Amino acid sequence: MSDTVERIKCLIIGSGPAGYTAAIYAARADLKPVMYTGMEPGGQLTTTTEVDNFPGYPEGIDGPKMMMDLQQQAERFGTEVRMGMVTEVDFSDEPGGIHKVTVDNKTELEAETVIISTGATAKYLGLPSEQRLRGGGVSACAVCDGFFYKGQDVAIVGGGDTAAEEATYLANICNSVTMLVRKDHMKASKAMQHRVTGTKNIDLRYNTEVDEVLGEQVVEGLRMVNNETGEKEEIKITGLFIAIGHKPNTEIFKGQLEMDDTGYLITKGKSTKTNKPGVFASGDVQDKEYRQAVTAAGTGCMAALDAERYLQTIETEVAV
């Protein structure tokens, strides 16, 4: 390794809507941002075939194409986009302190500010048929993709508040919703449970799991199994929604940054500031409520503005 460690004014970790939006704003503020894309360049939207709810695309847009557009826009203003995975961090506790970062377990960098946009990964069941049909009718976001199944028969897996909320959302636009709950009860709040049981076109199945997602290119049906009796049943559906939770990609920040009990980064007030000065978090890595591309992009903008103001404050203090 070279004796000279590269110093970066604004380092962006992650490359989804939050990261690219942060890069656009940081580059326009002359922060000379450097982005490391992570293992999934473009984030979760690269697995979405159609994005129909992001402002500015009246005809919708393919998810990977949208991410390419955002990358090109960030690069047009001077962002340096690099392939690589941040594997270790050592954040300074002092205002104006330098943050140390390791990429791919070998390259060491120093950064004056860091914007974390590593996102969250949706949990799936792990069935081969489910993975094969992701983007072909299997989705982890009913709010994102439910519109495409308007008037159709769908199913949803999960028993928590998110599953209950998404089930009632789907019930408003779909013909029928079959809800599979693995246990003999839902873990959702009582209010959400009442919403589910009070919705006529939701068929609630307890002690039921997915045995197989049916269809070659697109979802055509579902084979369910009762985990008490072993009895199997097939139903015809065109969409399967998995709502068993998300895992924030924050493993490398444990012990460095404050998190909630599920691993989401905690930011201060309405800002993107973490507990470390000069370190900011945007997108799904700190948002477990909305998890939309447009809200992620909004917090990416906020993080870049917070980073710019932080650097201005530090520079003013040094000048004084």
Image (cartoon, grey):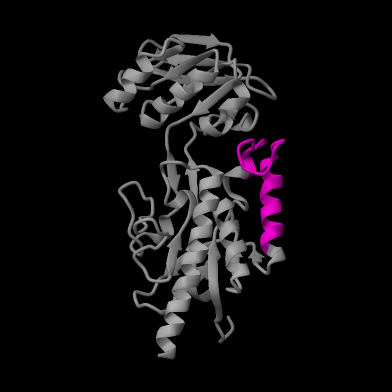
Where's residue 132, x and y in %?
63, 31
| Number of numbered discs on residues | 0
Q: Quadrant of the C terminus?
A: bottom left
Where's residue 241, x and y in %?
52, 27
Q: Residue furthest left?
A: 190
Does the stretch in magenta take in 160? no
* Range of magenta residues: 46-74
Residue at (41, 27) in percent of width and height: 165
Q: Nearer the viewer, residue 27 or 218?
A: 27
Left or right position of 229 against 218: left
Where's residue 100, x and y in %?
46, 74
Q: Quadrant of the N terminus?
A: bottom right
User: Can residue 80 be seen here?
Assistant: yes
**Vertical relation: 171 (above or below) 131:** above
Left or right position of 183 against 312: left
User: Can residue 98 be seen here?
Assistant: no
Q: Residue furthest bottom?
A: 320
Left or right position of 296 against 52: left
Q: Nearer the viewer, residue 8 or 303?
A: 303
**Vertical relation: 59 (above or below) 251:** above
Residue at (46, 66) in percent of width and height: 306
**Vertical relation: 246 (above or below) 313:** above
Where's residue 163, x and y in %?
42, 28
Residue 259 occupies quadrant: bottom left
Q: Nearer the viewer, residue 4 or 154?
A: 154
Q: Nearer the viewer, residue 12 or 236?
A: 12
Residue 92 occupies quadrant: bottom left
Does the stretch in magenta take in 62? yes
Residue at (62, 68) in percent of width and height: 27
Residue 270 occupies quadrant: bottom left
